[in-house]
Image (cartoon, rainbow, N blue to C red):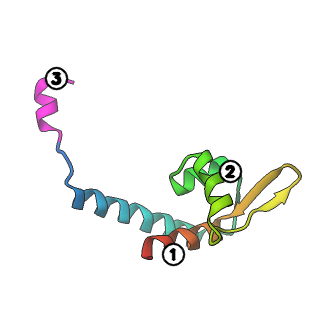
Amino acid sequence: MTAKGQDEKKKLTPEEKAARRAAREQRKAEIAATLPDRCFQALETATFLGVSVRYLHNLVEGDPTFPRAIRFSQRRVWKLSELAAWAESKREG
């Protein structure tokens, strides 16, 4: 990128970052409300929540409000509707 291009790049204020984050979370909730209930494996769940897989496992082990997983053999899956509701409650609280 040229020096001119770097000068034109705008830095976001904390308020603008918060507004973008809130809008992104709102879009996630709207999408989740329109989709049939799907099940996500760990990587998909972590991506949906915007966290790492390791942090997801910390949530599973340490947060009693986090949705319970459904076990399929060695794998665990989470319902999209439950994840969206949990994320919404954390955003409001």
Query: In this figure, what is the number of numbered marks?
Result: 3
Give x and y (percent) for residue 91.
44, 70
Contact flag, marks 1 and 3 (Cβ < 8 Å)? no
Query: Residue 72 occupies which quadrant of the picture?
Result: bottom right
Which residue position is annotated with label 3?
2
Image point (71%, 52%), residue name: 41
- Position of 1 relative to 83 (above/below): above
Image point (49%, 64%), residue name: 28
Q: Reading the chain from its start, which is encountered first: label 2 or label 3?
A: 3
In the rendering, which numbered label is found on residue 42?
A: 2
Which residue position is annotated with label 1?
89
Circle nearer the viewer, 1 or 3: 1
| Magenta segment | 1-9
For badge 3, the amino acid type reads Thr
- Position of 71 relative to 1 (above/below): below
Give x and y (percent) for residue 5.
15, 30
Our reading of the magenta stretch's main secondary structure is helix
- Position of 44 relative to 88 (above/below): above
- Position of 38 relative to 13 (above/below): below
Image point (22%, 61%), residue name: 15
